[in-house]
Amino acid sequence: MTKILNVRNLEKSYNSGSKKLTVLHDISFDIEEKETFSIVGPSGSGKTTLLGLCAGLDRPDSGSIELCGTELGHLSEDERAVLRNRKVGFVFQDFQLLPTLTALENVAVPLELQGAKNASEVGKELLTKVGLGGRFDHYPSQLSGGEQQRVAVARAFSNRPSILFADEPTGNLDAETGEKVIKLLFELNKEAGTTLVIVTHDLDLARMTQRILRLKGGKIIEAHEQH
């Protein structure tokens, strides 16, 4: 199998006042193409920091990250942004939709950035798939939390990413809505053949993925496969 993400000896710390706070310590793992993978741990265990590093949103102090066959350490900010636009999808806890754009415009944006001519058609198709076929022209403020997250899921798949990072995707949703969003995420993911990486503190959600990596205090305490 081809490795889509290869992380080696990652270290990350921040200066907090006069103290140095180590957030991640000697993290190594890899993820294969089309795998579903979750990173779990309590609040403050370094999961979101790790996700940001893996997606090239931030740089580690030391160690290496290879994403989709490209070593991130060798890339400039702009080059990393191009790689993300082409290869990476994101779903965030707080949806991160653009408030001045309609649902359809939010989904079409990543494609338009790539110069795609069919951005609107793809957007409509994805919104219909997530059950929002009648809501193309609604703005985020006119949608419920669950609907906004469904728009965000549709947007995440619009550029046909090789890998999708979901950071606490159900964190702001009630249990029932969260279940529906997760079901959609896994269905679209399977259909698209995308690699899915979920950061969560929800063990039930983590158990739906093929492998779980557990973090505590910035260190890996366990990595296991689900059977």
Image (tube, helix red, strand yellow):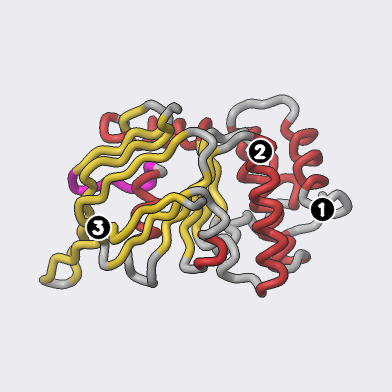
Q: Going by the image, does 48 lie left or right of 62?
A: right
Q: Which residue is drawn at 34% across and 47% down?
A: 53
Q: Which of marks 3 and 1 is nearer the N terminus?
A: 3
Query: Which region shows up in magenta?
Result: 56-62
Q: Residue at x 33, y 33 (%)?
A: 66
Whole-percent x, y for residue 207 in the image: 53, 59
Q: What element carries label 3?
A: strand
Q: Is mark 1 on a helix, strand or loop?
A: loop
**Between marks 1 and 2, how big is the CA–CA gap?**
15 Å
Q: Earlier in the sequence, mark 1 or mark 2?
A: 1
**Front-most of 60 and 142?**
60
Tell me the crowding category of disc 2: few under 14, some 14 to 19, or many 20 or more residues within 10 angstroms, Cα based.
many
Q: Going by the image, does 112 lie left or right of 66?
A: right
Q: Is mark 2 on a helix, strand or loop?
A: helix
Q: Residue at x 71, y 68 (%)?
A: 177
Above or below, comparing residue 37 to residue 110 in the picture: below
| Circle 2 residue | 158
Q: Going by the image, does 218 lie left or right of 212?
A: left
The extreme right residue here reads 134
| Circle 1 residue | 131
**Between marks 3 and 1, how big is the CA–CA gap?**
39 Å
Q: What residue type is labelled 1?
A: Gly
Answer whether residue 162 is magenta in the image: no
Q: Which amino acid does label 2 sit on?
A: Ser
**Front-most of 181 and 90?**
181
Q: Can you tell which of label 3 and label 2 is closer to the viewer?
A: 3
- Badge 3 vs badge 2, beta-carbon distance below 8 Å: no
Q: Is the magenta stretch mostly helix, strand or loop?
A: loop
Whole-percent x, y for residue 122 in the image: 75, 34
| Circle 3 residue | 24
Q: In which quarter of the image is residue 218?
A: bottom left
